[in-house]
Image: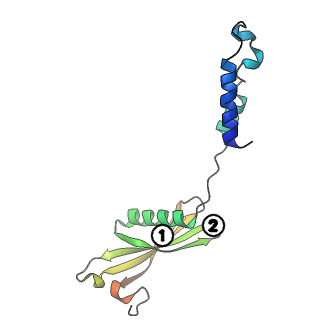
Amino acid sequence: MPPRRRARYDEDAASFRRRAPSGVPAEENGPYDEPEGEEEDERIDEPRRRRALNAVSAGQLGLRYIADLTSKETEGVTSVEPVEDGWVVDVEVVEDRRIPSTSDMLSVFECRLDDEGNLMSYRRTRTYRRGTGAYGGGS
């Protein structure tokens, strides 16, 4: 039974128990008594399933991790790629602001996330001047 219907059923059962015949003492209610915590305890002890990370949430996490670790201004996520054990996210960071802004120094940081979104590692993969493009040539 889907969880939503089960909850509704439990609510209906609880209201049914509250409407137990008034002439019957509480200890003799039998079918109207709450079960000894069977279903309730099972739902609490049941391990929570973690939802798999998608590309958008992996990119957002990578951006946040790099911003926190480097304390530098991030420009944005430049790539998100699934790998066997999680995600690889590349984040562009402003290393040094200059005038004019086309000569700012930028870096790309690669971070690896596991399937649950935990940061496993990060490293700077390249540094370049904004006007030259990521691979050195003119834009």
| Residue 39, horizontal then vertical, whole percent | 71, 32
Residue drawn 66% across and 18% down? 18
Q: Secondary structure at mark 2?
A: loop
Q: Residues within 10 Å of mark 2 (few under 14, many from 20)?
A: few
Q: Which of the 4 image quarters holds residue 31?
A: top right
Residue bearing mark 2 = 85
Q: Marks 2 and 1: CB-CB under 8 Å? A: no
Tell me how the rendering is colored: rainbow
Residue drawn 37% across and 70% down? 74
Residue drawn 69% across and 9% down? 22
Viewer-nearest residue: 44 or 13: 13
Residue 82: numbered disc? none
Q: Secondary structure at mark 1?
A: strand
| Residue 10, horizontal then vertical, whole percent | 68, 31
Residue bearing mark 1 = 122
| Residue 37, horizontal then vertical, whole percent | 69, 27
Note whether residue 41 is visible.
no
Along the horizontal axis of the image, is 115 left or right of 42? left
Height in image: 54 above or below 29? below
In the rendered image, the quadrant that contains the C terminus is bottom left
Residue drawn 71% across and 6% down? 23
Q: Which of the 4 image quarters holds residue 24?
A: top right
| Residue 122, horizontal then vertical, whole percent | 48, 69
Viewer-nearest residue: 69 or 16: 16
| Residue type highlighted by circle 2 | Asp
Along the horizontal axis of the image, is 121 left or right of 17? left
Q: Which of the 4 image quarters holds residue 41?
A: top right
